[in-house]
Amino acid sequence: MKRPLRLLSALLLALLLNPLAAEEESLLMMRSSQSFPEAMLAVQKTLGEYGYTVSRVQRVDIGLTASGFETDRYRIVFFGKPEEIRHLSGEHPELIPYLPLKMTIFAEQDETLLVALDPTALDDIVDDEAFAQLTMRWKNDIIAIMDELREY
């Protein structure tokens, strides 16, 4: 029981250390009864159905294992729409550290959790109405994707 709580605490601490995630509302979270492998497949499939491209899936468990955590079910999924990412990176290079979008997925006992930064938190970096509409669309998509994954 302590290991999953330590893992969740470490994840939340890492996210909360990000200045954009300082407020609780800046995180979008979902808990699923799916197994980790099922949830990983469903995340990638559902992102594609919403028009997003998964650019990579990064294993985080190697560093966690070195820190004493026992898990092989912890990934960060990087995703976005390539044309949007290229355009925004050129127009607003200050966004480069935050792009592409990221979703963390990890197993906790018999459940799988998904956590993402609320993209509207990026509105603090770029003060532009068109960008605010884009981040709101991203947020709505992430929420819809999480809702679909919850129902699998």
Image (spheres, rainbow, N blue to C red):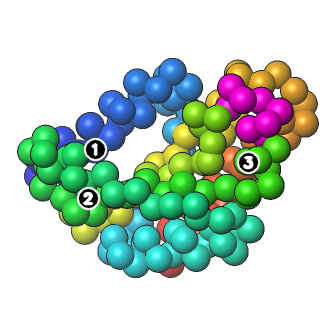
In three-dimensional space, the C-alpha distance between marks 3 and 1, rounded to whole angstroms, equals 29 Å
Q: Amino acid at mark 2?
A: Glu
Label count reads 3
In three-dimensional space, the C-alpha distance between marks 1 and 2, rounded to whole angstroms, equals 8 Å
Q: Mark number for residue 43?
A: none
Q: Nearer the viewer, mark 3 or mark 2?
A: 3
Label 1 vs 2, first from the N-terminus = 1
Q: Nearer the viewer, mark 3 or mark 1?
A: 3
Is the Cβ of the residue at disc 3 closer than 8 Å to that at disc 1?
no
Residue 132 visible in the displayed image: no
Decide: is 48 above or below 58.
Answer: below
Decide: is 38 above or below 110.
Answer: below
Residue 146 shown left or right of residue 106 in the figure: right
- The residue beneath circle 2 is 108
- The residue beneath circle 3 is 85
Residue 40 shown left or right of residue 116 in the figure: left
